[in-house]
Amino acid sequence: MPIILQVFLCSLTGGLVSLTGGLILLASKKRMKWAEYATAFAAGALLASALIDMLPEAIEEGGDVNLTATFVLIGVVVFFLMEVFLTWFHKHGERNNEGHEHKESTDPVVPMIIMGDAIHNFIDGMAIAAGFLISPASGVVVTLAVAAHEIPQEVGDFGLLLHKGVRRRKVLLVNVLSSLVTVVAAMIFFLIGDTLNISFMPALGLVAGFFIYIAASDIIPSIHSDRSHASKTKKALLLVAGILTVWVAITVLHGVMHEYTHDQRLLHLENGEVMSIEQ
């Protein structure tokens, strides 16, 4: 299968899978306790994807540990500032609407929520593209981490839009369209990186910084804030499970892809020898 088709299918699948949390929310709010546990699993998956897969590949690609670390730091700071900006916009819109009836057509918070979701999905597309620029195996691993992270994220977006009075059918349509941003971003950035044959070390460093920031600043503190010891223990175990799942996926998928590449090279060599004999 052509790699560009793999990028398309994985980004599309990842975007649609991330909507499952929101769909369950639309069906029943009572079933959403599992989303908290999915968040803990996502933290482990994001950390493992960044530290076990993306960073080693970025260092190997760039050949400079300090430069790679600099791009990781830039990624952390940029996404921190982005979150601060979006959070301020969100709260500013809510203050402007205090004392007023929330209406779907006039509430400025609604487009802010949609814009924030689209930006997140665009970054997810960049991450998937960066993974596939390393190898198809890394692309699949990054897609897994992105989907695990986005499921609880979409739950929040669905819930906010419903709270603002947006109709269920429109909430679903908006989020489906927003998830397609992931596909567009993945295709664009993969084609740019593949066609221009430029170093993808900066992109890998930035995406690794994004993954580390999301896990360390948002998800892990939320686990610590859980007052239930039993719930906190379950989440800690799921975080470890997320790390182990990605580690196993990286090991297995890279092994499979290595064997496949090796077999393909042998096949090409055998075909070349046959053609030489025939000539």
Image (tube, rainbow, N blue to C red):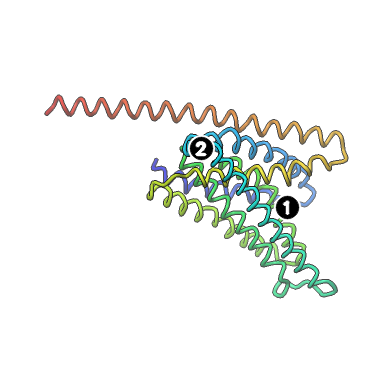
Type of amino acid at the residue the image marks with label 1:
Leu
Q: Which residue occupies the foreground of this view, 69 or 51?
A: 69
- The numbered disc on residue 25 is 1
Label 2 residue SS: loop
* Residue at (83, 43) in percent of width and height: 225
Q: In this view, does 148 lie to the left or right of 107?
A: left
Q: Which residue occupies the foreground of this view, 134 or 263?
A: 134
Crowding at label 1, few (<14), some or many (≥20) Cα neighbours within 10 Å? many
* Residue at (63, 63) in percent of width and height: 115
Q: Which residue occupies the foreground of this view, 180 or 194?
A: 194
Q: Is residue 277 visible?
A: yes
Can you identify the residue that label 2 sits on? Answer: 64
* Of marks 2 and 1, the one in the foreground: 2
From the viewer's perspective, is residue 172 above or below residue 37? below
Q: Which residue occupies the foreground of this view, 114 or 86?
A: 86
Quadrant position of residue 222: top right
Q: Position of residue 27 (x, y in %)?
A: 72, 53
Q: Which of marks 2 and 1 is nearer the N terminus?
A: 1
Q: Where is residue 104 in the image (x, y as percent from the top left)?
A: 72, 71
Type of amino acid at the residue the image marks with label 2:
Asp
Q: Position of residue 89 (x, y in %)?
A: 72, 65
* Residue at (61, 49) in percent of width and height: 74
Q: Is residue 23 visible?
A: no
Q: Quadrant of the C terminus?
A: top left
Crowding at label 2, few (<14), some or many (≥20) Cα neighbours within 10 Å? few
